[in-house]
Every structure is written in structure tokens, then in C-alpha cells.
Amino acid sequence: MEKHELFHTLHQLSRQLMNKLNEELKKYGLYHAQWSVIYTLKTQGSLTQKQLCAYLSVEAPPLTRTIQRLVKQDYVKQIQGKDRREKHIVLTEKALTEYPAWEKAVLDVNQTLLEPLPNSSQQELYKLLHTWIKQLPQ
């Protein structure tokens, strides 16, 4: 495999996976970027916008737009930190109430996409991806 094929293949795979996820989340008025923020806050707890940017490897402007949409939907709120420039992002009660339905939708898409692969390949895929992510420089 030529070196550039890795990036092309990963990009194509990522786009197809995100499109499938968006199709399912659209029923709930969400997109994959919003789900990423919601999932991260659910699993990591309250984070500053800067911490979210770092964790999700996203630039500040698109994350700001995503957070603004989530605020309008009443799924997250921003709490002023000790420093005036610092805002902590937290899930609202509305988001916590709706989270199980969103999670089920994501899990259903996940299962559908992985279904063609045998269980051993699914486990190996997760192992490889997690190992690779941990080894990438921040």
C-alpha cells in the first residue's frame, strides 16, 4: 500500500461512518459533532471549551458553533469559571434525560456497521485503533 492511500482510505471511511451516524441522529435534531461533545461531557464530566478542543482534536471556531447550537437546543450550558475567559460546559437535565435514546441510536448504527465483520475482527479493530490513538503525538 502506498503511504498516501492510508490518508485517503481513512478519510473515505470516516466520511461514510459520519454520514451513517448523521442519518440516524438527524431524527433527534443532532449531528455527529454535537454527539461527540455530548458523549464526551457524559463520560468525562464538565470540561472547559479549551479542554474539549484538546480532547476532541477540534479547532475552537467549529467547536464554538457546535456548543452554541447545543445551548440553543438546551442540551448544554456554559458556566463561568474563576477566570472570566474560562467557561465550563455541562450537560443539562434535558440532555441527560434524552441521552439514553441518543446512545441507543448510536449503538444501533455501530452494530449495523460492524455486523459484516466477525467478532474477532471487531475486537482486533478496536484494539488497533485504541493503540494507535494512544501512540499519536498530541
Image (cartoon, rainbow, N blue to C red):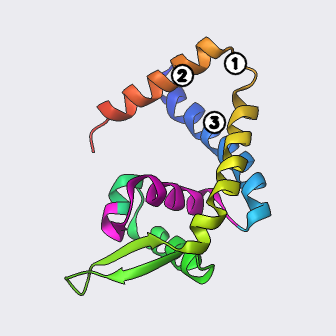
Label 2 vs 1, first from the N-terminus: 1
Dominant secondary structure (helix, strand or loop) of the stretch shown in magenta: helix
Q: CA distance from mark 3 to mark 2?
A: 14 Å
Q: Which residue is mark 2?
A: 125
Count of labels in the image = 3
Circle 1 crowding by C-alpha within 10 Å: few under 14, some 14–19, many from 20: few
Q: Amino acid at mark 3?
A: Leu
Q: Is residue 3 visible in the rendered structure shown here? A: no
Q: Nearer the viewer, residue 128 or 88?
A: 88
The boundaries of the magenta stretch are 30-51
Indicate which label's residue lies in the foreground, 3 or 1.
1
In the rendered image, the quadrant that contains the C terminus is: top left
Q: Is residue 71 above or below residue 40?
A: below
- Helix, strand or loop status at disc 1: loop
Task: Answer left or right for 138 relative to 68.
Answer: left
Q: Are marks 2 and 1 in contact (CB under 8 Å)?
A: yes
Q: Amino acid at mark 1?
A: Leu
Could you say where residue 15 lies in the image, as x and y percent from the top left?
Answer: 65, 45
Q: Are marks 3 and 1 in contact (CB under 8 Å)?
A: no
Tell me, yes or no, whether the highlighted magenta stretch contains residue 45.
Answer: yes
Q: Which residue is mark 3?
A: 13
Q: Amino acid at mark 2?
A: Leu
Residue at point 68% right, 64% down?
Answer: 30
Image disc number at residue 117: 1
Could you say where residue 25 lies in the image, as x and y percent from the top left?
Answer: 72, 57
Q: CA distance from mark 2 to mark 1?
A: 10 Å
